[in-house]
Image (spheres, rainbow, N blue to C red):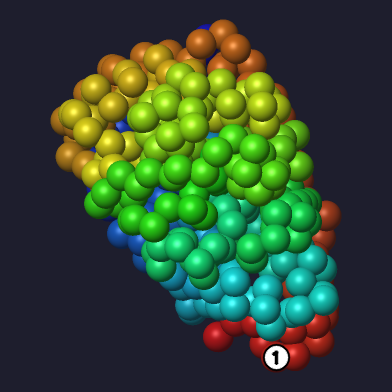
């Protein structure tokens, strides 16, 4: 049986009866959590159980837990991490090991809550024009270094039993606008993109899941990458990504049209799964209907990704914290 080609969220701390009925009928590929869904660890675990029970399977549950501004659950339940770019700069030459340990601890925190997918690593380059909403979420401006650090992030998550999602394909660092509100355009030519933005994703094209960005690349097509046939073809062929490809949140104002129209445009462009967040139940229902079911190829990619969820080896968190303190010169979290 194929799953619905959508990832959806919930209104509150537990599913309502209407949400449970809807999820049972729509059978979305997975779910995503936000701060409004978080109270206590026991409550988060119960919500995750509600979601999986609604679809009758061990569905993936996603979160954006990068650290810094993009962190959905906080102290006292988990560590409050510094922004990734600040953390990398503090670690200096030890950044690769430090990033691995940081995300290995984050994976342990998430697994303990019932969450098994994290929307990280951020593989975008931190460039002079990078918008402030993204810049300190990045890992640097050198493609080779960013690829190395992103690989460390992915490995830390995978070793902790959490699937990584690399974002925002095929690159968001050149965007000088916030896609929550506006659609940025990038004028760089393909040769330059190949050597910079695309190079990071190409180095990690074996990862199980990736996320598109709502950015126009004029060298490809005058449409946001999420709904661009040429951009999706570039991700698949030029970058060589073979994993499950999902959209960034299609409720962002960089995209135009109703949520259902945006969803169909993304699926028809070649994206596997539509991510839709922060909307009334009726809009979630419309998106699930527009997304339909995963294609045969997308279903195979989804199953291959989920097969990489492992039971992690025991972790001595205190020892990891001590090592991180030594690598960064201070505690890396509040």
Q: Nearer the viewer, residue 24 or 261?
A: 261
- Left or right of 279 in this view: 42: right
Would residue 279 be seen by someone viewing this image from the given angle?
yes
- Left or right of 289 in this view: 48: right
Seen in the picture, residue 47 relative to 260 is either above or below; the reply is: below
Residue found at x 19% / y 29%: 257
Residue found at x 56% / y 8%: 296
- Left or right of 38 in this view: 321: right
Callout 1 crowding tier (Cα within 10 Å): few <14, some 14–19, many ≥20: few
Q: Quadrant of the C terminus?
A: bottom right
Asked which secondary structure carries label 1, the reply is loop
Seen in the picture, residue 162 relative to 146 is either above or below; the reply is: above
Q: Nearer the viewer, residue 208 or 235?
A: 235
Residue found at x 62% / y 44%: 192
Q: Residue furthest bottom?
A: 330
Q: Which residue is mark 1?
A: 330
Seen in the picture, residue 321 relative to 44 is either above or below; the reply is: below
Seen in the picture, residue 55 relative to 132 is either above or below; the reply is: above
- Left or right of 262 in this view: 147: right
Image coordinates for residue 96, horizontal then vertical, percent: 79, 66
Total tally of numbered discs in the picture = 1
Would residue 321 be seen by someone viewing this image from the given angle?
no
Q: Nearer the viewer, residue 82 or 75?
A: 82
Image coordinates for residue 166, horizontal then vertical, percent: 60, 45
Image coordinates for residue 120, horizontal then vertical, percent: 59, 52
Image coordinates for residue 53, horizontal then vertical, percent: 45, 33
Q: Nearer the viewer, residue 152 or 13?
A: 152
Residue found at x 34% / y 56%: 177
């Amino acid at each position: 049986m194929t799953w619905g080609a959508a990832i959806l969220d919930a209104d509150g701390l537990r599913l309502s009866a209407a949400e449970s009925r809807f999820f049972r009928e729509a059978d979305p590929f997975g779910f995503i959590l936000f701060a409004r869904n978080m109270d206590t660890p026991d409550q988060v675990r119960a919500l995750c159980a509600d979601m999986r029970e609604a679809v009758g399977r061990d569905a993936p549950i996603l979160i954006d837990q990068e650290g810094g501004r993009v962190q959905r659950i906080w102290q006292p339940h988990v560590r409050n991490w510094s922004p990734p770019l600040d953390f990398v700069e503090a670690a200096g030459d030890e950044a690769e090991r430090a990033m691995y340990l940081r995300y290995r601890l984050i994976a342990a925190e998430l697994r303990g809550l019932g969450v098994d997918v994290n929307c990280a690593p951020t593989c975008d380059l931190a460039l002079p024009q990078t918008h402030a909403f993204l810049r300190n979420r990045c890992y640097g401006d050198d493609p080779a270094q960013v690829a190395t650090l992103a690989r460390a992030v992915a490995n830390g998550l995978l070793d902790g039993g959490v699937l990584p999602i690399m974002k925002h394909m095929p690159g968001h660092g050149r965007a000088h606008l916030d896609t929550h509100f506006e659609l940025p355009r990038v004028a760089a030519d393909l040769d330059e993109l190949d050597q910079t933005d695309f190079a990071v994703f190409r180095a990690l094209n074996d990862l199980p899941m990736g996320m598109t960005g709502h950015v126009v690349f004029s060298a490809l097509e005058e449409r946001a990458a999420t709904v661009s046939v040429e951009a999706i073809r570039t991700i698949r062929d030029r970058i060589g990504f073979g994993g499950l490809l999902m959209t960034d949140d299609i409720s962002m104002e960089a995209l135009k049209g109703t949520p259902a129209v945006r969803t169909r445009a993304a699926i028809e462009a070649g994206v596997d799964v539509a991510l839709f967040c922060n909307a009334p139940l009726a809009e979630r229902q419309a998106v699930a209907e527009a997304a339909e079911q995963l294609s045969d190829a997308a279903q195979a990619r989804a199953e291959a990704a989920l097969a990489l969820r492992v039971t992690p080896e025991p972790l001595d968190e205190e020892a990891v914290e001590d090592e991180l303190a030594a690598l960064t010169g201070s505690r890396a979290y509040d």
